[in-house]
Every structure is written in C-alpha cells, then in structure tokens.
Amino acid sequence: MYSFTYEPIAEAIIRAKKRGIKIRILMDKGQSQSKYSKYEFFLDNAIAIIQDRHAGIMHNKIAIIDGRVLFTGSYNWSKSAEGKNEENLLEFIDEEEIIEI
C-alpha cells in the first residue's frame, strides 16, 4: 500500500486480526513515516508490517483477502481517497488467473 492513513479501514483490520485473521501489510517506506500514517498504529497492535525497500516509491494499492478477493486501483487507503479525490477501486472475486499469492 502506498498511502495508508484512513482510520476506519485501519480499525477494521485490527478487528479482523482479533477474529483470528492473518494480516500482512507491505507499505511504502516514505509514506509509512508520514504524519497520518497508520504504520505505528499497526505495529502497536501486533500487525505484521514490512516497509518496501526499493529506491522508488511502492505506488501499488492492492489487497488480497483469503487468496480469493483482490482489490486494486488508484484508491489510496486515505480519508482524501474516500471523500475528496476521484479514485477507482476494482474488485475481483474467485478469479484464479488474476489472483496469485
């Protein structure tokens, strides 16, 4: 995830972890240190989180759930993406040729 600042989605992830769901997050290194980043929030809640170490930005916005649901698009998981920006978010369900873990 490039930018992850949106509190409601971060809280939903914590609730999922408490239900026993395995969560792993890969974040852009520069964005993980931004003012509103949920990086520290996830660490404080024992979420497995990795910072991308490539020289450029990790600009992907992807979520794979249970190996069968894929979300991707321009949508950063931020308040601006939710209420202000013009974004797109595609959902693929049970598309094995698209979703590979």
Image (spheres, grey):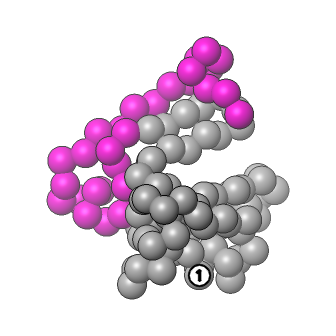
Local SS, label 1: helix
* Residue sitting farthest toward the right: 20
**Image coords of residue 63 (percent x, y):** 55, 44
Look at the image and say whether residue 81 sits in the magenta stretch: yes
Crowding around mark 1 (Cα neighbors within 10 Å: few <14, some 14 to 19, many 20+) is: some
The span shown in magenta is 73-101
- 100 in relation to 33, above or below: above
Q: What is the quadrant of the C terminus in the image? A: top right
Residue under the image location 61 percent in, 15 percent down: 97
Indicate yes or no whether the magenta region holds residue 90. Answer: yes
Query: In the visual, does 29 lie left or right of 6?
Result: right
- Please name the amino acid that badge 1 sits on: Glu
User: What residue is rendered at 31% in x and 66% in y?
Assistant: 79
- Which residue is pictured at 45% across the width and 47% down the height? 60
Relative horizontal placement of residue 40, taking residue 1 as reference (left or right) = right
Give the residue number, with chain letter if any, for mark 1. 40
